[in-house]
Image (tube, rainbow, N blue to C red):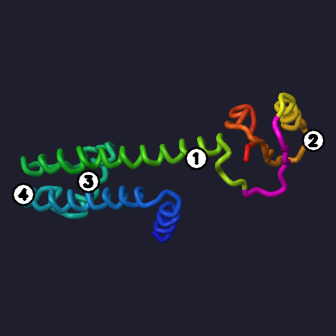
Amino acid sequence: MIHVIQLLLKFRQKAGYTSIQLVLAYFLLILLSSFMVSLVEPPGAALKSFWEAVWWSIVTSTTVGYGDVSPVSAAGKIVAVVLPMFLGIGLAAAFLTYLASLFVERKDKKMHGEIEYRGKNHILIVGYTPETRVIIEQILGDELREQRDIVLLADIERHPLPISCPARNG
């Protein structure tokens, strides 16, 4: 559990509060839907137990839907549709979309040379000319070279070799 908390705190520092807000909103939704369904289900129903309801809320909101337990009352089914199904799936989608946008933004910054390079023992190429691509491809094709990053330091708008090599502009 401590690793999850550390990961969330580290992620918060990099991504801001949005990721933490989405995760907390999801956990609150799970707790609320679990409490509500266990409250409205009739005595003897599988979801009368809070922990069974938590399991059901998580499984339902992640669209896994094992079907091992489900609400039997009309009120329980309404809670199911509104909370873990509609809102839970929406929150999960929002969180995953947010994560994807962070990765896309990072790649875009990398392609525009807006990320500081912190590596060591790299090959530095200063300036970009039409021959630079050939030089980088020769370095990458050399079987005897050590596996080191290639850093391209050039005043260009966009990375000239986005797919063909791991070179970076900075």
| 123 drawn magenta | yes
The image quarter in which residue 167 lies: top right
> At 7% from the left edge and 61% from the top edge, which residue is drawn?
43
**Magenta region, residue range:** 118-128
Q: CA distance from mark 4 to mark 3?
A: 17 Å
Residue type indicated by callout 2: Leu
Badge 4: how crowded within 10 Å, few (<14), some, or many (20+)?
Answer: some
**In which quadrant of the rendered image does the N terminus lie?**
bottom left
Vertical relation: 65 (above or below) 35: above
1 or 4: tag closer to the N-terminus: 4
Q: Position of residue 70 (x, y in %)?
A: 19, 48
Label for residue 132?
none
Q: CA distance from mark 4 to mark 2?
A: 72 Å
The image quarter in which residue 55 lies: bottom left
Q: Position of residue 124 (x, y in %)?
A: 84, 48
Where does label 2 land, which residue?
144
Under circle 3, the secondary element is helix
Residue type indicated by callout 3: Ser
Q: Are marks 2 and 1 in contact (CB under 8 Å)?
A: no
Outermost residue on the bottom side: it is 2
> At 27% from the left edge and 61% from the top edge, which residue is drawn?
28
Label for residue 42?
4
129 and 52: which is toward the camera: 129
Outermost residue on the front side: it is 155
Q: Are marks 4 and 2 in contact (CB under 8 Å)?
A: no
| 124 drawn magenta | yes
Q: Nearer the viewer, mark 4 or mark 2?
A: 2
Q: CA distance from mark 1 to mark 3?
A: 33 Å
Where does label 3 land, which residue?
57
Q: Position of residue 102 (x, y in %)?
A: 51, 48
